[in-house]
Amino acid sequence: MKILRLILGDQLDQNHSWFNEVDENVTYLMAEMRQETDYVKHHIQKITAFFLAMRSFSKELSEKGHNFSYYKISDGSNLQDLEKIIHKNIEITGAEKFEYQLPDEYRLDVQLSSICEELKIETATVDTEHFYTTRYELKNFFAGKKQLIMENFYRMMRKKHDIMIVGGQPEGGKWNFDHSNRKKWKGTPGIPKELGFGQDVHKVVDEINKADIVSFGEIDTRKFNWPTSRKECKETLHYFCEKLLVHFGDYQDALHTEEKFLFHSRLSFAMNAKIISPKEVINTVLDYYYENKSDIDISQIEGFIRQILGWREYMRGIYWKEMPEYAQLNSLENKNPLPDFFWTGETKMNCLKHSIGQSLEEAYAHHIQRLMVIGNYALLTQIDPDEVDKWYLGVYIDAIQWVEITNTRGMSQFADGGIVATKPYVSSANYINKMGNYCSNCEYSHTKKIGENACPFNALYWNFLEEKKEHFKANNRMAMMMNLLHKKDKEELNKLKERAHDIIAHPDKY
Ligand code: FAD
Ligand code: SF4
């Protein structure tokens, strides 16, 4: 029987069981499509990385003997639309059956189901075999529970998959070493230089530009550093184990003007495109840890495993539990527009200048830049979560909706009313100053609350708590913050609010 199998741009797993055997009756269909480049405005490095990774995947598997029907963005015969491309390829190949791997994005899941309803041939879906969990495992795990606490899910995952468990108990005596993961980086220990691949990508970028795809952000077309082939992704993983893991946990939350990547793995694109699986990452990192246990503290490895086995799988489960309603949630009723400086990085606020500037230069910011600098500002200035989501979905190389929206709308913007986070991640300048050196090089003073050079985050913070207090009345975890708010001198609070309103009305002035 002739079979046509679709592979989406984030399904680049060469170890998928589909490829165990070469079958001449099977054709694999892949297409670089306008429907995928245009659903939001993307960073140029993100589009480039996906096209490179897709091309590398189809090339390597074609070399092993698999049949591929591949459409580059520039191919004249590319119909640019998923439905049309599927129909055309069923006709060309004479396929009697159409198969696809379950998509991780809701929009594609709906689209493919509806395409299949109209097809006259047999259709079937298979799992991507990528995640530890199935789509609805988290939903079932939390069935009947009021709160979906990540820590509970994480512990279940550790036990279920026997990861860092000794005699039924967590290795090292604790489940979570988060409290050891909060050091400020002050110039030491030395950070190994970035592992870059220096690829010449100008041809792909030319094709993207010729196709008139609207993108933003910077790219060095002669020196593209992201890993996009299977070999490069594996090298990135090994580099992380050998050079970065030893300090990963300690400086996980650190911020620094001169160090964009610190000890972060930068494996998110490789994993989200499924070039490398979370199991492969975790097993490799654990093997390395057990071989070098005397040199690596348990807090470093636990901190890393928690992000992948815990947060990554948790976010995916929340996505499938809550979509499609999740994409509309705006529990705090935030409505302000995104300031222009999100597209330029031009602001006097040093933390935002660096974090947004770096996002535009590298299509990357690490977790605390995304959460406690950019996300914190967006929430404190009460920006519409739709706008915040679009920006995050476009700017980061690893942004795919299942993991972007749960982190942005949920964890960062509290727009889901507390499904992901038990309280909003907001802070004044205090936290940003505690975790890095942005404040010591800023035009604003992190200690001042009022006056021309007072840090905008300070006024914004108190204004946010005051304006949104009704939403937090019943939230125990906000009780301390609310208590401090009630004790605040009314005159001072009014001045803070006045300044906050000016910042919100004229964000690009600050
Ligand atoms: P490392 O710090 O080295 O961490 C290792 C891995 O852990 C990451 O590669 C990632 O796969 C996983 N991980 C860590 N934190 C999370 C998390 N909160 N949720 C899911 N996985 C996690 N991650 C994405 O992959 N895509 C996104 O679009 C995305 N958007 C985000 C938006 C906001 C507002 C926030 C606060 C976080 C977002 N994250 C997203 C999570 C996290 O910031 C990135 O996974 C991480 O910065 C990627 O860099 P890294 O590979 O160097 O990560
Ligand atoms: Fe950011 Fe305020 Fe610190 Fe400046 S002083 S870097 S604006 S937190």
Image (cartoon, rainbow, N blue to C red):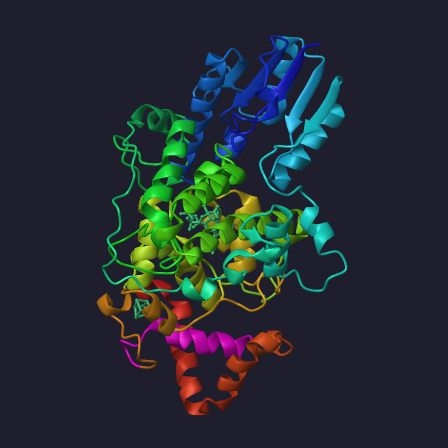
Q: Quadrant of residue 130?
A: top right
User: Which is more toward the observer, 427 or 15?
Assistant: 15
Which residue is drawn at the image coordinates 60% and 47% (left, top)?
Answer: 162
Using the image, determine if residue 467 lies above or below residue 80.
Answer: below
Horizontal and vertical percent position of residue 303:
46, 55
Residue 211 visible within the image: yes
Using the image, determine if residue 481 lies above or below residue 150.
Answer: below
Horizontal and vertical percent position of residue 255:
33, 60
Using the image, determine if residue 57 lies above or below residue 413.
Answer: above
- Which quadrant would the N terminus be assigned to in this image? top right
Q: Which residues are magenta?
A: 451-468
Residue 461 within the segment the image draws in magenta: yes
366 vs 273, left or right, is left
Majority SS type along the magenta span: helix
Horizontal and vertical percent position of residue 133:
64, 43
Q: Quadrant of residue 203?
A: top left
Q: Quadrant of residue 67?
A: top right
Residue 71 within the segment the image draws in magenta: no
- Which quadrant would the C terminus be assigned to in this image? bottom left
Residue 119 visible within the image: no
Horizontal and vertical percent position of residue 139:
71, 51
Which residue is drawn at the image coordinates 73% and 62% (left, top)?
Answer: 145
User: Which is more toward the observer, 497 or 274?
Assistant: 274
67 vs 338, left or right, is right
131 vs 145, left or right, is left
206 vs 421, left or right, is left
